[in-house]
Amino acid sequence: MTEKNIQKLSVQGVAKYYDGLPVLERVNLDVEKGAFCTIVGASGCGKSTFLRMLLSQERPTRGEIFLDGIALPEEPTPDRGIVFQKYSVFPHLSVAENLILARELEEAPLTGKLFGSSRRSAFSDIGDLLEQIGLSGAANKYPAQLSGGMQQRLAIAQSLVKRPSILLLDEPFGALDPGIRLDMHELLLGLWKDLDMTIFMVTHDIHEAFKLGTRLLVFDKIRHDPQAPEAFGATITYDLPLSAPEFGAENTSPEVIAGTISREKQLPLNSSKSNLS
Ligand SMILES: Nc1ncnc2c1ncn2[C@@H]1O[C@H](COP(=O)(O)OP(=O)(O)OP(=O)(O)O)[C@@H](O)[C@H]1O
């Protein structure tokens, strides 16, 4: 086994407070390279905050997160990509231009633009990615000319330009129609296998979580004070290996898990985020 294969993400005793109030507390987790962790939990319980800490966009208030035994850097680095629910692409740039932008900013920090052979080389280098993501026929189109699904494909492609080993997805398909979602599931599973990534994906759709994940993480509060609902943070209350069929399947169906989450705001089985709020 090579060193790359044993890459592990370790979350140790992490808590996150905002304005003195806990959002997350006592979060402990070890994830092997190549896992596909789906994350569910009631609205506002800290799932996005958890992803932002994995990205180093936020620092834990307490505890530490390690990758291969080394504390995560204080800033986001190219080995971790992220995709949000809302398309994060630049509307004034074509698909191909969106995808070479990071390289342009890196190689030409003053102008933010490559010219001549450097530009041609940058376009040529994203050819495979465009193919993989199913956008090679749309390289010269602008985001406004793309469907929602294609815009989200572009957002995913953007997150993959730097070939991250960890991909963070925050409700990436929440705004898409059910049929398009199914296409995106196929796309994502293919990319996960081909690119050998570890994935953390927040979803409000419990069936999506069960379908895609090799491991399901449920965030919820274990301590409640009815007089002070904000007194305690959420933690990981269930950590289920989904790819191990012998693991008490009758106790771990989507219905059972949805029923366990948050007494105030149950996770709907056929969900979209708007159902939760
Ligand atoms: N930068 C911030 N400053 C202050 N409070 C914040 C900040 N970011 C998040 N919060 C608060 O932390 C809590 C958790 O937010 P977060 O977005 O992580 O929850 P979530 O589980 O992802 O919610 P949702 O499912 O609705 O997207 C919320 O109460 C939110 O208002």
Image (spheres, rainbow, N blue to C red):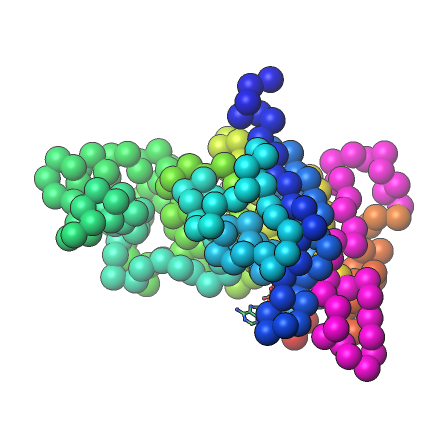
Q: Quadrant of ligand 1?
A: bottom right
Please name whichever residue, 233 or 104, is drawn nearer the observer in this view of the structure: 233
Image quarter (top left, top right, bottom left or bottom right) of the C terminus: bottom right
Does residue 216 lie above or below 194 as drawn?
Answer: below
Q: Is residue 129 left or right of residue 241?
A: left
Whether residue 198 is visible, yes or no, is no
Image quarter (top left, top right, bottom left or bottom right) of the N terminus: top right
Whether residue 165 is visible, yes or no, is yes
Query: Residue 231's spot in the image, x, y percent?
Result: 75, 73
Query: Residue 211's spot in the image, x, y percent?
Result: 68, 45
Q: Residue furthest left?
A: 116
Q: Which residues are magenta?
A: 221-250
Q: Is residue 99 left or right of residue 110?
A: right
Please name whichever residue, 207 or 4, is drawn nearer the observer in this view of the structure: 4
Task: Name the residue located 44 percent from the left edge and 50 percent from the top edge.
Answer: 75
Does residue 45 lie above or below 236 as drawn?
Answer: below
Mark count: 0
Task: Say whether residue 245 is magenta.
Answer: yes
Does residue 37 lie above or below 235 as drawn?
Answer: above
Please name whichever residue, 88 or 128, is drawn nearer the observer in this view of the structure: 88
Query: Residue 185's spot in the image, x, y percent?
Result: 57, 46
Task: Name the residue located 47 percent from the left edge and 50 percent from the top edge.
Answer: 74
Q: Is residue 84 left or right of residue 1?
A: left
Task: Name the residue located 53 percent from the left edge and 25 percent from the top edge.
Answer: 4
Q: Residue furthest top?
A: 1
Task: Name the residue located 85 percent from the left edge and 34 percent from the top edge.
Answer: 246
Q: Residue furthest bottom?
A: 227
Query: Residue 89's spot in the image, x, y percent?
Result: 36, 58
Secondary structure predominantly adopted by residues drawn in magenta: loop
Task: Say whether residue 238 is magenta.
Answer: yes
